[in-house]
Image: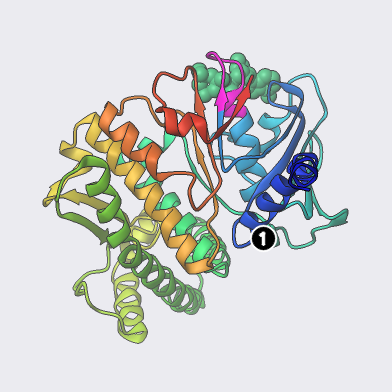
Amino acid sequence: MPFKFFNFFKDNLNILNLANLINECINKIFLNKLKIKNFRNHKSFEIDLKEQRAIVLGCNGIGKSNLLESIEFISQLKSNRALSDKDLIENDSDMAVVFGQIDFRDDLKLNLFRKGPKRIYVNESILKKQSEIKNYIRSVCFCSNDIDIVRSEPNYRRIWIDKVVSQLEPVYLDLISRFNRLLKQRSHFWRSESFSRKQSSDIVESFDIQMSIISTRIFRRRRRALLKIKPYVEYWHNHLSKSKEQIGINYLSGIQNISPEEEEEEVISKKIAEQLFNQRSIEALTGKCNFGPHRDDIEFLINNISVRKYGSSGQQRTFILALKMAELDLLSKTLNVPPILILDDVLAELDITRQNLLLNSVGKDSQCFISATHLDKFNQSFLGSSQMIHL
Ligand SMILES: Nc1ncnc2c1ncn2[C@@H]1O[C@H](COP(=O)(O)OP(=O)(O)OP(=O)(O)O)[C@@H](O)[C@H]1O
Ligand SMILES: [Mg+2]
């Protein structure tokens, strides 16, 4: 009898493994299948994913980042690396396809055309509202360009914070696009003839009112998100650097005479409206709106010292990793499901202690993809629990 049971158990081991995997996927986002066609340098590639951790392994230029980019693309419908979606289509092809199956249940397909907009299908029905892809798959990605968030111009930090806020509150994207539209119309107005006409002050007045309301909403949401993410950044920074340093994250806004604690929507909006009014004469000459969410910045500090200005290359890298891991934790907590974590080129420039601390922390609660050119940097326990994707 025991022998019979053993045989039954052995025969059904695969089914049991699958069942375990499905059980594990409840309350997680698990990409269990990925197929890509004519995506960057990949003519055709297909993989079934079985482990929480996957290492994408191969030499320089083989297509590791491209593969990870396809997962980023199907989850966020944009890529951090590509200026245009068309760059993602293999150079000699007219169309690229990314297919992913989530939790052994939902089929996501993304068709990308050289001419015309991309199309997204969920379980073979077209997704009319593309932002709804978030109901099926989400990801947090780290790639080598992300160092710009800490190191480069304010624009990178604004893009980062807008991405974080929009994941937490999807309506935020609408606020940003309304603000950008207003900014464009306002600049167009100053350059046109219409502002010399009689009714021009009514038009500017209307711009000021709309811009001050929308700017206030963006300002409050960005600041709120930074407050929420800060404890996680501090935790991850201190964990990865094995230190107990004080982290500072400050929102640097151009709004004058505003206290860091000011929360009242009406007060903030009034201050912005006043400032917009006061700068009208300069704006009429330059055609540029000199302050607002499009000019704000974020300051990252370690023990009150600017990471951007004075941080070493390794410190900046640890900080950006802490930001990304904090983003993952914050999203997991807010959404109750951990997004997929994509780590491209993450191990370069990290010392061995930091590498191990990072590797030991990823792929437990969320599915994790990590690229590497060789396996020296991975410890045995990580290798033992990872699926290898050889390119
Ligand atoms: N649209 C495209 N069509 C065809 N090939 C492309 C396209 N875009 C990029 N490539 C090619 O894909 C190749 C692989 O790039 P990728 O960045 O994925 O390599 P990698 O394995 O990550 O390398 P590394 O280890 O250096 O990071 C490059 O040689 C690049 O020229
Ligand atoms: Mg790469």
Q: Residue at x 74, y 46 (%)?
A: 2
Q: Is 336 located above or below residue 368 in the figure? A: below
| Residue 65 is a magenta residue | yes
Which residue occupies the extreme right position in the image? 124
Q: Secondary structure at mark 1?
A: helix
> Tag count in the figure?
1
**Residue 54 lies in magenta, yes or no?**
no
Is 344 placed left or right of 289 in the picture?
right
Residue 346 visible to an observer of this rendering: yes
In the picture provided, is 153 more to the left or to the right than 339? left
Residue found at the very far front of the displayed protein: 1
**Which of these two is toward me, 188 or 1?**
1
Tell me: residue 290, above or below residue 111.
below
The spot of residue 285 in percent (x, y) is 36, 55
Q: Position of residue 115 (x, y in %)?
A: 81, 37
Percent coordinates x, y for residue 383 in the rendering: 49, 29
* Image: magenta residue range: 56-66
Neighbor class of circle 1 (other Cα within 10 Å; few <14, some 14-19, many 20+) is: few
Q: To which quarter of the image does residue 42 belong?
A: top right
Can residue 298 be seen in this snapshot? no
- Which residue is the site of mark 1? 131
> What amino acid type is highlighted by mark number 1?
Ser
Report the front residue among 189 and 293: 293
Q: Is residue 257 left or right of residue 18?
A: left
Ligand 1 near label 1 (Cβ, under 8 Å)?
no
Above or below, comparing residue 13 to residue 63 in the picture: below
Q: Quadrant of the C terminus?
A: top right
Q: Residue at x 78, y 55 (%)?
A: 105
Position of 271 with respect to 363 (left or right) is left
Q: Quick one: 203 or 33, which is closer to the camera?
A: 33
The colour mode here is rainbow
Task: Tell me where residue 149 appears, x and y as whole percent.
Answer: 36, 43
